[in-house]
Each structure stands twice: as structure tokens, then as C-alpha cells.
Amino acid sequence: MNVSLFITCYNDTLFPATGKAVVAVLERLGHTVEFPQAQTCCGQMHYNTGYQNDARRMMLHFLEVFRDAETICVPSASCVAMIREHFPKMAAASPDASVGRDVDALLPRVYEFCELLVDKFRTVDTGASFPHTVTLHTTCHSLRGTKIGERPVQLLRAVRGLSYVELPQADQCCGFGGTFAIKNADVSAAMLSDKVRAILDTQAEICTAVDNSCLMHIGGALSRQRAGVRCLHLAEILASTPGEFA
């Protein structure tokens, strides 16, 4: 199957290894990955901070870039939530009815990375080997937006050598929330402290998630505490082979 990768601007700028890992997994499973060079941003940052016109222009660009894509893979539950929840709202507010039709045609082709593997490709075994203890941070958008449920856990349990440890209070926010961490720094820091304590209680070597934004927030705190716990996007674990991350 041909899969068009929307890497997301966050990953492209700060976490390029995630995109490479997604490509490695999909190609290992026999799929062809395309990367539309003209892609930019889904507009979430602008939409959430009140720049509606800018977000709308980004949506229109996204619709054009991925107009002919057979299947669209997005390694970020946050961006998928933006596309599914807010593209229709912006389209409904547009005087151009064709925008709504374009959004309706787009949505069934958009998959968060775990959804694509489990729901579309009907597989949980990506051929990965990762002999480490791993816990999963359930991000807010994956839990409440895309509702991907147990899919990440199913994928982790199929990784050879991996020991999965459930994270206490996994449904609690890490405190990032985009600009929330800037506008409400004290509250964000307190939430982050609770999350880090829960991660350390698992004694896991790795904390993973499906959103690098949260992992950056958590990873920063773990690094400052010299806790010895690393953060990796789920795709990087699923792409790993024997000998990596030893």
C-alpha cells in the first residue's frame, strides 16, 4: 500500500528520528512511503491560540498537499485530533462549500500511526526487538481526542525482549499542553512533577508515548534530575532491531 507520511512540523524540527522510524516500520511491513515535500503544519498551534485565519490557510494547504493521498500516516495523536476535530469546524465556517467536501473526503484517510498498524494493517508485530523495560505515557490527545485506547500497549507487548510496565495514573496529563506550559508554568511544573514521580516508580528504563511534545516535556524533567530514564517515541521502539539502544 502507498502511505503518505505527514511528519508534523514538531517532529520535523525537533525529532526527525521519529519520521525515520515510521518509514522503517512501514517499509519493513512491505508498504511504500511517500513524503510530500510541500507539507507544512496542520495549524494546531495557531488554531489553539486564536489565529483562526492562519489556521484556516494551513488547513487549505494541507487539503491540497494530501488531496490524492491513498492513506495518510501521522505519528502524532495531537495533530490527528486537530485534523479530525477542528478541520470540520473551520470548513463549516467557510463560505466555500467545496472545503467541507474536501475535509469529508480527507478524514477517512487519516490515521494516527498506531491506528494505521492495528486497524488498517491488522498487525501488532513490526518485527522489532527492544530488550528494555518500558512504560507508556498516555497523552491527553491520544486518550481523549483520537481515543486510540490499548493500541500502543498491544504494539509494545509484541516487541521481542521488551518488558512492559503499566504507568500509575496513566490518564493524568503531564502538564505540557502546548502554550499551557508557558501561560501556567507553576501548574504545569506541578503536574510534570507528579508524572515524573509516577514514571520513576515503575523503574522503567524508557518512557514512551505517541506524541513527542509530551515526551519533550517529560524528558526535560528526567534529564534535569539525572534520573537515567530516556524518552522515545513509540515508532522508534517499533523500528528498533537487535543491538540498538543496548
Image: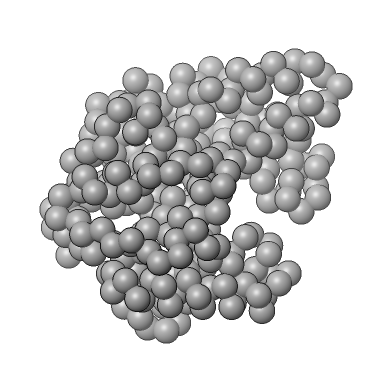
Q: Is residue 120 above or below residue 97?
A: below
Q: Is residue 129 visible?
A: yes
The answer to which of 154 and 57 lies nearer the viewer is 154
Task: State the quadrant of the C terminus.
Answer: bottom left
Identified at 83% across, 29% down, the residue is: 93
- Residue 139: image x %, image y %? 50, 55
- Residue 132: image x %, image y %? 20, 63
In-image side of 208 versus 96 (left or right): left
Identified at 48% across, 71% down, the residue is: 195
- Residue 204: image x %, image y %? 28, 69
Q: Residue furthest front?
A: 169
The answer to which of 69 and 121 lies nearer the viewer is 121
Identified at 30% across, 44% down, the residue is: 154
In-image side of 45 versus 204 (left or right): right
Q: Is residue 13 visible?
A: no
The answer to which of 168 and 179 lies nearer the viewer is 168
The answer to which of 104 and 8 lies nearer the viewer is 104
